[in-house]
Image (tube, rainbow, N blue to C red):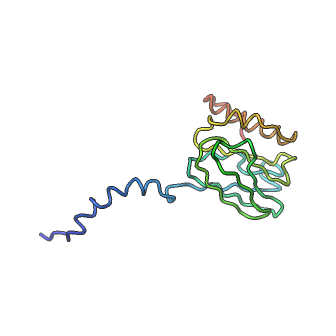
Amino acid sequence: MLRPPPLLRALPVLLVPLLPLLAASPAAAAEVTVRMVTDGSAGRFRFEPRIVRIRPGDTVRFVAHDPIHATKSIPGMMPEGARPWWGEMGRPLAVTLTVPGVYGFKCPSHYAVGMVGLIVVGDPAPNFERARAVRHPRMAQEAFARLFAILACEAEGRGDCPPE
């Protein structure tokens, strides 16, 4: 019977220490797309989806379907140690988030008309109440109130949570 060459026999021993690195590699991370639209399936001047749920290390790619939109993180609506972002009008932007918590974002041009959204990275608890307490222009405040109500409902494990 033929025996495999020594290098091939040693391969499992060489690869086992690398398994944790392979599991944590960027290839294991997911990417979610958020569309920035003027006329969306659920209304005007919206992010679709408005709530994004990801794991730490995943990426959110914002894609403008009109050149009048951009994305910007909202001060006070990010967990401690998270990095803010500010995209360019009409240009896609990819943001990789590693710190668990809630992230609020807006379209700077359409913030006043309620073009806002939330990203939940893992557990929302670290900054949920602090992010919910941030004040906004009236229509953005109303939109955030609906989004936070959905997250609170989900956290309670209720099956009757309203749609986004």
Quadrant in the picture for residue 143: top right
Of 6 and 40, nearer the camera is 6
Q: Quadrant of the C terminus?
A: top right
Examine the rendered structure and indicate whether residue 1 appears above or below residue 119: below
From the viewer's perspective, tell me whether residue 142 is left or right of residue 117.
right
From the viewer's perspective, tell me whether residue 85 is left or right of residue 1.
right
Q: In the current view of this chain or complex, which residue is farthest to the front?
A: 81
Where is residue 98? Give x, y as percent: 58, 49
From the viewer's perspective, tell me whether residue 141 is left or right of residue 18.
right
The residue at 85%/52% (across/down) is 110
From the viewer's perspective, tell me whether residue 85 is left or right of residue 2.
right
Where is residue 160? Give x, y as percent: 67, 30
Of 34 and 93, nearer the camera is 93
Marks counted in the figure total: 0
Q: Quadrant of the N terminus?
A: bottom left
Where is residue 152? Give x, y as percent: 68, 32
The residue at 56%/47% (across/down) is 55
The residue at 48%/57% (across/down) is 25
Where is residue 125? Give x, y as percent: 62, 34
Of 1 and 12, nearer the camera is 12
Of 29 and 129, nearer the camera is 129
The residue at 51%/58% (across/down) is 26
Q: In the current view of this chain or complex, which residue is farthest to the left?
A: 1
